Image (spheres, grey):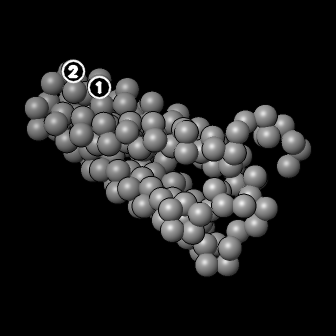
Amino acid sequence: MSGLEHLLPSTIHPMVVHFTIAVAYLAGAAGLVGAVRQTSFWSRAFLYLLLLGILATASAAVAGVVSESYLSRIPEQVAPMLHTHKEDGLWTGVFQVVAAALQLALGTRRDRVSWLAAASAILACVFVTLAGHLGGTMVYQYGLGVKA
């Protein structure tokens, strides 16, 4: 890497990713409540939280690349977990984008929450949970990013 990414601390990913997790869960909850209640408030809240979640997920991905650049080596037993962690993060973003697109296409014009969009947002919650579990395992069990 060029060295510019080292203007940020090695801990930038864990500093950013918690916001991503919280917003993904809030969007999923707003989607479920909105699909049941069907009011314009929930429709707008759901869409805004999805859009914020997409930005947060992209930020977490960039921060992950920066944090990974600080690692001198990745232990052999951790490499597959790291790969799956990245894939789960990618799927989180994909399902958030799909949920936002579905909500824009099917729900927002009618001031309601699309059940398909809500289901996609819940899938994003599942994948952010899986990514978080693996991230925590890599840090707390294997010391990735915190042990010299």
As rendered, which of 6 and 50 lies closer to the eye?
6
Name which residue lies at 51% across and 36% down: 56
- Residue 28: x %, y % from top left: 29, 42
Residue at 42% x, 61% y is: 133
| Element at label 2 | helix
Which residue is outermost to the bottom?
Answer: 77
Relative horizontal placement of residue 53, taking residue 55 as reference (left or right): left
- Classify 37 as above or below 143: above
**For the point 50% across and 62% down, which residue is it?**
140
Q: Is residue 35 above or below residue 144?
A: above
Helix, strand or loop under label 1: helix
**Residue 58 visible in the shown view:** no
Q: Amino acid at mark 2?
A: Phe
Q: Which mark is residue 74?
A: none
| Residue nearest the observer in this picture, 109 or 145 | 145
User: Mark 1 touching mark 2, by CB under 8 A?
Assistant: yes
Tell which of 73 and 55 is nearer to you: 73
How crowded is the residue under tag 2: few (<14 C-alpha within 10 Å), some, or many (20+)? some
Local packing at callout 1 (Cα closer than 10 Å; few below 14, some 14-19, many 20+) is some
The C terminus lies in quadrant: bottom right
Instruction: Identify the residue at the far front of this view.
Output: 148
> Residue 64 appears at what percent x and percent y?
63, 49
Question: Is the residue 129 above or below the residue 54 in the image?
Answer: below
User: Is residue 139 shown left or right of residue 92?
Assistant: right
Q: Residue at x 66, y 61 (%)?
A: 147
Q: Amino acid at mark 1?
A: Ala
Q: Which mark is residue 45?
A: 1
Tag 2 residue = 41
The percent coordinates of residue 98 (x first, y second) are 42, 46
